[in-house]
Image (cartoon, rainbow, N blue to C red):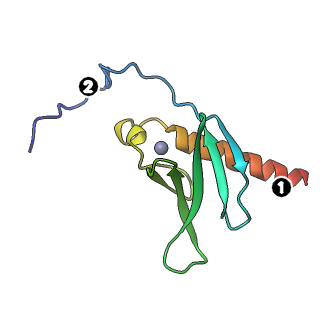
Amino acid sequence: MSNLRPRKDPRNPHPRRPSRPAQGVARWLTRPDHHMVGGVLEVNGQSYELLPLYSGAETVLDGYRLLKGDGAMYDLPRDLSTCDCPGHTFRPEQPCKHMLALKAAFARLADEGRAA
Ligand SMILES: [Zn+2]
């Protein structure tokens, strides 16, 4: 066992970085089709391509991949309960901007669907 990373103090889990809530300001630059293909989402001024992830059979949507312009990609499960970005990896107790942004963006799609 390595002792390089001390156990987190639950009263002060992030002594160096003041914890600030993630912001998930999102808007669709391009809306995805009903297969969740072709979406481009802007999160805090950064644009991401939205890709659907399928497990095994291509009919079962398993999650989403956000592809950033610089090549970084982040995968989220279908329920958006987690994200493999550094932000969420280091602060698993907080939803990251990708989780918040996708939740908000999908809610907006659903609203638009009802309105149409
Ligand atoms: Zn994330």
Residue 49 vs 86, above or below: the answer is: below
- Asked whether 23 or 79 is in front, the reply is 23
Residue 50 percent across, percent down from the top left: 59, 56
State the mark number for residue 88. none
Which quadrant of the figure contains the C terminus? bottom right
Q: Residues within 10 Å of mark 1 (few under 14, many from 20)?
A: few
Q: How crowded is mark 2: few (under 14 residues within 10 Å), some or many (20 or more)?
A: few
Residue 67 vs 36, above or below: the answer is: above
Callout 2 secondary element? loop
Residue 101 picture quarter: top right
At label 2, which amino acid type do we have?
Asp
Residue at the disc numbered 2? 9
Residue at the disc numbered 1? 113
Q: Residue at x 55, y 51 (%)?
A: 80
In the rendered structure, the answer to whether residue 90 lies left or right of residue 35 reads: left
Which badge, 1 or 2, comes first in the chain's sequence? 2
Residue 95 vs 73, above or below: the answer is: above
Residue 92 percent across, percent down from the top left: 40, 40
Marks 1 and 2: which is nearer the front?
1
Q: Which residue is drawn at 68% across and 68% down?
A: 35
- Asked whether 71 or 102 is in front, the reply is 71
CA gap, disc 1 to disc 2? Answer: 45 Å
Callout 1 secondary element? helix
In the rendered structure, the answer to whether residue 4 lies left or right of residue 48 reads: left
At label 1, which amino acid type do we have?
Gly
